[in-house]
Amino acid sequence: MRRRFLRRPLAVVGLVVALVFVLAAIFAPIVAPYSAGATDFNSILAHPSRHHLLGTDELGRDVFSRIVWGSRASIEAGVLATLLALCVAVPIGVVAGYYRGWVDTVIARLTDVLLAFPFLILAVGLAAILGPSLTNATIALGIGAAPGLIRIARGEALALREEDYVRAAVANGASDARILARHVLPNMLSTLIVQATVAIPAAIIGEAVLSFLGLGVQPPTPSWGVMLSDAQSYLSQAPRLAVYPGIAIFICSLSFNLLGDGLRDILDPRTTR
Amino acid sequence: MSLLTVDGLSVRFDTDDGPVHAVDRLSFSLAEREVLGVVGESGCGKSVSFMALLRLLPETAVVSGRAEFDGVDLLTIPSSRLRRVRGRQIAFVFQEPMTSLNPAFKVGRQIGEVLTRHLGLSRGEAERRTVELLDLVRIPAPDRRAREYPHQLSGGMRQRVMIAMALACAPKILIADEPTTALDVTIQAGILDLMRDIRERLGTAIVLITHNLGVVADVADRVIVMYAGRKAEEAPVGDLFAEPQHPYTNGLLGAVPRPSVEGPRARLREIPGRVPSLAELPGACAFAPRCPRADERSRSQVPELREVRPNHLVACFHPGPDLAQTG
């Protein structure tokens, strides 16, 4: 399996870049040359230089350092929101798909209703209700991503309950809980892993959007969305203030997407090998 | 002493096109250490009957009758008690060895789990017993195979693993639903040989569901021939092959290729017509439209089972061996 993964250069690049972002977030104090809030009023809106790799912003803060620190909010929101979505969606979807009946009908229709709202609109609405903070933005993104995952988990459970090995397990006296834990969940794991790697970049972008709108991370805490929002006023003088966090968002979410594509190719038995 | 007594088992599916009678008043018994062959064409209700016994059919199936096992009626006991019968006392082996194992776990672990779960063995004991079981079903290098995933095993090997798993709890009855259909002929022989061996060594009663009369002739003690959800004939295996009574059984035997040393090769005979739809259960012998011996009575009355010779039951107005074939 490792060899199959390594044969896909794009997926490997995705994995490496995603790891760089994750490590940068974890080791931000070591990686970033300055602290996120350190101002240097002698160099305001400075161009990139030896001292300030990507220049400084309107308060003389080092842009590179802020992007490194800002990755914490993005990675945290991306990973935690996805985990939250999985924790909510998988039990609901599996119960619906495995037991069928009216519970399934209700859950499936509710999911359809929620899916009618675009992911970001749903997240923005939830974040507005919960109030602005990184935690609330993460919760909003997690719940916003849940309907899609419910549908996937339900579909998998629907297919897996018809498998011969599930039938054989029933015939040999396995309880429902046991069948779910031993036969249904393990066999949908690869699909869920792939979906998770696709959900992470969506949540990263979602975090940036919410922060940009003032519903996520609050200044002066750095976040790519906050940096974009601050850069608006200086677009004519220093467009690079918007470009750098934009590139960070782009590359970070792209890397997770490439990783997800690669994982799908090797884990999903339905795609041709 | 009979281990399992089934009395008047009927299974009906209520579909949009009306009721379908998959099994109609089937009665039989199974003795300890007995190998019972159940033969019939696809869709004659042989699998459905035994799935119904363990209540494995979807909820759309309406099951009636009695199935006495170990002093209880399997069809009415609560499902929590039934779950302790399934696997532990009556084990099922399905037709599809390729897909009946969970692809996510090593086979040794899947067998071991049954042992720790149902018999309360410790991990180490279960591991040892797993290897013994794999050895019992004659898998070479069982300790190595136990550490492999299902996709690394061949079809015959997987069927052996399924049988090992079914035998894990030393069940009193092993129901094998077409256990050899998906396998090569040489491997089929090995599996049948294994079945005989299991009966000899463990004393397990075996129900062998198949459409292959050759398989039955090989291992069964007694045979039930089913047609369109009903029992057409029941006899000890020797009697059935020596003096088949029901014209359907005669037809089935005529369709089995056999090598003949002397004389011209006999042409295989087919049974004309096709299997009747189970939706319309006429007040007549279900085989009448395809039967060379059918007369007015066959077409207007349902023949009841009667004993033509000791232990030889047949549901036909005109029983007897086919003269054209035996003569």
Image (spheres, rainbow, N blue to C red):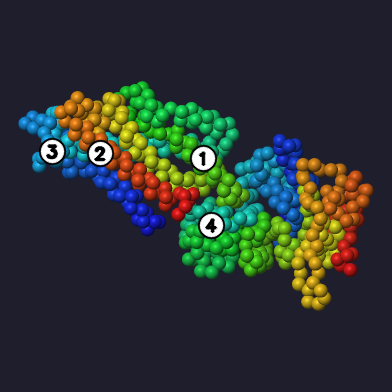
Amino acid type for the residue under numbered disc 1: Gly
Tell me whether marks 4 and 1 sit on the same chain.
Answer: no
Question: To which chain does the residue with label 2 belong?
Answer: A
B220 left or right of B122 in image: right
**Disc 3 to disc 4, C-alpha distance:** 65 Å
Q: Which residue is mark 4?
A: B111
A32 left or right of B252 in image: left
Residue B249 against residue B12 in the figure, above or below: below
In front here: B78 or A209?
Answer: A209
Q: Which residue is mark 2?
A: A248
Camera-nearest label, 1 or 3 = 3
Tell me residue B282's x, y (percent): 84, 43
**Disc 4 to disc 2, C-alpha distance:** 50 Å
Tell me whether marks 1 and 2 sit on the same chain.
Answer: yes
Q: Residue furthest right?
A: B296
Please indicate, yes or no, whether residue B292 appears anywhere in the rendered image: yes
Could you tell me if the residues under marks 1 and 3 are in contact, i.e. CB atoms within 8 Å?
no
Q: Residue at x 70, y 48 (%)?
A: B48
Amino acid type for the residue under numbered disc 4: Ile
Dot 3 surroundings within 10 Å: few (below 14), some, or many (20 or more)? some
Residue B175 marker = none
In front here: A115 or A187?
Answer: A115
Tell me residue B17's x, y (percent): 73, 37
Camera-nearest label, 3 or 2 = 3
Q: Earlier in the sequence, mark 1 or mark 3?
A: 3
